[in-house]
């Protein structure tokens, strides 16, 4: 083995270690809240370079009535912590089957979004909307699904327990924001959040997102069950993620209008 | 012409009204019954799964209850859940921290539903990944009643719609090919008959990333307008639009071949419809319209109804070709369009005016359209600009009274979310008729005029403004929507208020109105004023 190959291997090994969020190379606890939040953001929303999943949601309102949502998601990262492309194809409820969303997520400007309405065969571009409103009628907000950019908040490390970091995040601008601040408990190994609590101006926790189940998929810790609760109304939504696969090599050119009309089955199934 | 909309002559006054009511009453009774059943189901068993009703309820179980479950699958999951994400981290502390307390708060049976869900799927092959073909079945049952709410001298029927509809959707998908079927059968009390309407029966084939093709019966749409179509010359169904059917019925199907070529960020769509498919136009039978030949609003009382135009011969050279070249530069979307075929509405005459038996019928003139559009995000909203030149090439001089003149049509629109879940869309549309002087000039002695009805023509510039307001409430279960067309120069308006409420998951009710007003009888919306109606629609999806 010559030295060039050795250098290559070393570089490769380093790259693998660096790209794995659960790299056990921790010397000690992190002190910088912003760094923790950035890593958490990458662990939750930027796992691997691309991915596929089947998401099912059960929405339960304050009267106990339930509804379902089911959709397949394809994701491809342009840059870790940065822009991403999403294709979401709905299967349930029956009246929205084959409705599809194409989202080009940007971190420095509004996302580009398209909606496909199968009955009309219409690809509709949709204007940017409030990120903190219901995602397809669930208790999740759009922002919970695609991630809130860490730079939108000021972060403060409140506590470091044996297994978790507790970070308090306060929005830099309160425009369109219904919370005063929120606290996140972040697992020290996986950097996945275990609980997020939103506090209103009166200091009351009114909304909670809990991680119910984490699985390891292709070596990547992945949240597979989440519960979001509206503590004021008593309603909640459960989310279950299955069929997760990473690094499929999903090409960028499937994130186009044509894929809304005719979803790329090769990657969805 | 497909025997689809209003080609029958069975429609007679009086009796249909009763039938309308009878059909509607039946459908609504059935749906109300279904809704009651659902409401009970939802309220009676808030946390139990719909499928697991027969199973003994495990109660607010903890990990130890695992054995109580009959299915080994559920047991497995429960254990995994209780132990938490063992794989996630080797550390012994994490799992409980992560999952323990939550699993206790959320009843485990709540999560069991997802396991049942998975099994359901494998039944119909839904999201199964190991099968080559995936199959899906769906559809809905729907009842619609729409009475006229104004006095109509032209139409005897008090209802514009009274129907019970069954829709079947079938999909078979494969990695490189798929087949699709969308078929409606509906009992129509206004026409007193049963209609079969196949909206889609097509096959899609993908050839790599750069080529795809769909052939068969299909619904096609493009362009940037909202309920305004400039470069979209695919068939529309204006009857459906004005009587309260779902928006999707504004688009009518055609038997076409669509080919798509993708080259990096540029796409090219070419669509060929071998046999010309006109709009499902308003012909007087269901909805009344202004007939410029008689100078009157013509409804089902008129012996001239339904309007029976002369269609182009069903020959390949009378087919239509639609093309679109599209791409994007950053967030800006650009497209160019082309069309060769016919005017989609019978706005021409089959020959010069003459007394019977040589009297002309309505007819379709030849037409080519060239246009372009731009769409881009601006100031937190979206702006769109579209233009189209309607080249009525058999009468470019504008002197033939049997053929409509060429036109330029332009559109500018802006839409944005004003408040959370409150959307606004504003559009300005312009129609400019070329060779207008030739149309309106008095006829030289012994010669034909430019138009037989100059007094009923739209202005040289016809302006139209539209406003859309949409508010979503109650976790998106209630939608309030208002769409308004207003023409400041024709002084007519069309208002579409609509309330949609999802009663229980598969059941939705829509209440709305189609309100047409106009100072004159001959303007675009003014001619429809006697059709002003309110409607109720109840849909059960499966």
Image: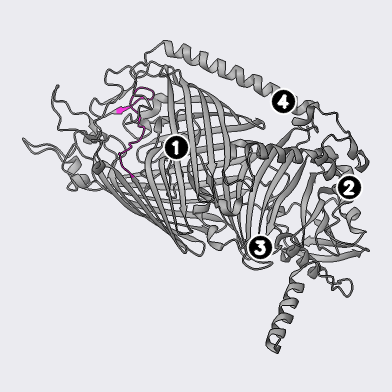
Q: Position of residue A188 (x, y in %)?
A: 86, 64
Q: The C terminus of chain B appears in which quarter of the rendering?
A: top right
Q: Which residue is mark 3?
A: A247
Q: Which residue is mark 4?
A: B39
- Taking the view exactly as shown, the residue that stands out farthest to the front is A1
Q: Which residue is mark 2?
A: B82
Spatial separation of the CA atoms under disc 3 and disc 4: 44 Å
The chain identifier of the residue carrying mark 3 reads: A
Q: Is residue B477 magenta?
A: no
Badge 3: how crowded within 10 Å, few (<14), some, or many (20+)?
some
The local secondary structure at tag 1 comes to: strand
Callouts 1 and 3 in the same chain: no
Judge whether B449 appears above or below A193 on screen.
above
Badge 4: how crowded within 10 Å, few (<14), some, or many (20+)?
some
Comes first in the chain, label 2 or label 4 = 4
Is residue A200 in view from this perspective?
Answer: no
Callouts 2 and 4 in the same chain: yes
Q: The N terminus of chain B appears in which quarter of the rendering?
A: top left
Which residue occupies 72% across, 43% down? A57
Badge 2: how crowded within 10 Å, few (<14), some, or many (20+)?
many
Indicate which disc residue B201 carries.
Answer: 1
> Is there CB contact under 8 Å for labels 1 and 4?
no
Comes first in the chain, label 1 or label 4 = 4
Tell me which segment is drawn in magenta.
B273-290
Q: Position of residue B64 (x, y in %)?
A: 93, 41
Spatial separation of the CA atoms under disc 1 and disc 4: 35 Å
Which residue occupies 89% across, 43% down? B104
């Amino acid at each position: 083995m010559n030295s060039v190959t050795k250098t290559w291997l070393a570089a490769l090994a380093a790259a693998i270690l660096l790209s794995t969020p659960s790299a056990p190379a921790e010397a000690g606890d992190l002190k910088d809240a912003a760094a923790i939040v950035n890593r958490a953001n990458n662990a939750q929303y930027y796992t691997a370079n691309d991915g596929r999943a089947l998401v099912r949601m059960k929405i339960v309102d304050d009267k106990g009535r339930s509804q379902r949502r089911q959709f397949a998601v394809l994701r491809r990262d342009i840059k870790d912590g940065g822009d991403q492309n999403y294709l979401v194809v709905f299967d349930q409820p029956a009246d929205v089957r084959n409705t599809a969303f194409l989202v080009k997520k940007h971190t420095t400007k509004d996302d580009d979004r398209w909606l496909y309405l199968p009955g009309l065969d219409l690809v509709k571009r949709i204007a940017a909307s409030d990120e903190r409103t219901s995602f397809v009628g669930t208790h999740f907000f759009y922002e919970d699904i695609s991630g809130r950019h860490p730079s939108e908040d000021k972060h403060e490390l409140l506590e470091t327990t044996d297994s978790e970091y507790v970070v308090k995040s306060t929005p830099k601008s309160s425009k369109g924001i219904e919370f005063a601040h929120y606290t996140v408990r972040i697992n020290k190994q996986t950097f996945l959040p275990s609980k997020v609590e939103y506090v209103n101006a009166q200091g009351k926790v009114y909304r909670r997102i809990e991680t119910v189940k984490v699985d390891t998929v292709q070596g990547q810790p992945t949240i597979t069950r989440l519960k979001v609760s509206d503590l004021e109304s008593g309603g909640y939504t459960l989310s279950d993620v299955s069929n997760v696969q990473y690094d499929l090599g999903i090409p960028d050119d499937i994130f186009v209008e044509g894929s809304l009309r005719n979803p790329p089955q090769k990657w969805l199934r | 012409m497909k025997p689809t909309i209003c080609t029958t002559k069975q429609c007679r006054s009086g009796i249909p009204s009763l039938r309308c009511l009878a059909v509607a009453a039946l459908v609504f009774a059935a749906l109300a019954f279904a809704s009651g059943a659902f409401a009970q189901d939802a309220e009676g068993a808030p946390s139990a799964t719909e499928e697991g009703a027969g199973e003994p309820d495990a109660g607010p179980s903890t990990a130890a209850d695992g054995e109580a479950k009959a299915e080994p699958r559920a047991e497995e999951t429960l254990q995994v859940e209780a132990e938490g994400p063992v794989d996630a981290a080797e550390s012994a502390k994490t799992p409980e921290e992560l999952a323990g307390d939550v699993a206790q708060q959320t009843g485990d049976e709540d999560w069991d539903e997802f396991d049942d869900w998975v099994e359901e799927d494998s039944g119909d092959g839904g999201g199964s990944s190991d099968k080559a073909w995936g199959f899906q079945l769906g559809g809905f049952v729907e009842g619609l009643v729409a009475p006229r709410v104004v006095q109509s001298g032209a139409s005897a029927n008090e209802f514009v719609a009274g129907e019970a509809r069954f829709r079947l959707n079938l999909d078979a998908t494969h990695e490189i090919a798929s087949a699709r079927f969308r078929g409606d059968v509906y009992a129509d009390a206004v026409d007193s008959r049963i209609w079969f309407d196949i909206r889609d029966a097509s096959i899609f084939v993908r050839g790599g990333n750069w080529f795809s093709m769909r052939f068969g019966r299909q619904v096609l749409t493009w362009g940037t307008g909202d309920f305004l179509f400039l470069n979209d010359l695919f068939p529309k169904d204006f009857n459906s639009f004005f009587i309260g059917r779902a928006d999707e019925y504004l688009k009518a199907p055609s038997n076409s071949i669509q080919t798509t070529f993708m080259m990096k960020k540029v796409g090219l769509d070419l669509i060929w419809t071998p046999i010309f498919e006109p709009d499902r136009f308003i012909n007087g039978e269901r909805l009344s319209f202004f007939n410029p030949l008689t100078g009157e609003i013509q409804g089902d009382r008129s012996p001239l109804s339904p309007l029976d135009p002369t269609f182009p011969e069903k020959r390949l050279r009378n087919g239509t070709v639609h093309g679109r070249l599209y791409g994007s530069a950053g967030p800006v979307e650009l497209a160019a369009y082309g069309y060769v075929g016919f005017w989609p509405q019978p706005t021409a005459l089959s020959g010069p005016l003459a007394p019977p038996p040589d009297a002309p019928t309505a007819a379709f003139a030849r037409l080519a359209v060239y246009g372009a559009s731009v769409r881009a995000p601006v100031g937190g909203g979206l702006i769109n600009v579209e233009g189209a030149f309607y080249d009525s090439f058999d009468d470019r001089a504008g002197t033939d009274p049997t053929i409509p003149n060429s036109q330029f049509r332009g559109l500018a629109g802006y839409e944005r979310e004003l408040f959370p879940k409150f959307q606004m869309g504003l559009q300005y549309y312009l129609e400019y008729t070329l060779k207008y002087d030739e149309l309106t000039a008095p006829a030289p002695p012994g010669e034909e005029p430019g138009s037989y009805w100059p007094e009923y023509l739209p202005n040289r510039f016809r302006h139209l403004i539209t406003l859309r307001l949409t508010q979503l409430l109650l976790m998106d279960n209630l939608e309030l929507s208002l769409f308004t067309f207003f023409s400041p120069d024709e002084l007519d308006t069309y208002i579409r208020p609509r309330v949609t409420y999802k009663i229980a998951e598969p059941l939705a009710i829509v209440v709305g109105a189609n309100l047409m007003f106009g100072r004159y009888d001959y303007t675009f919306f003014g001619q429809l004023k006697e059709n002003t109606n309110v409607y109720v629609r109840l849909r059960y999806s499966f």
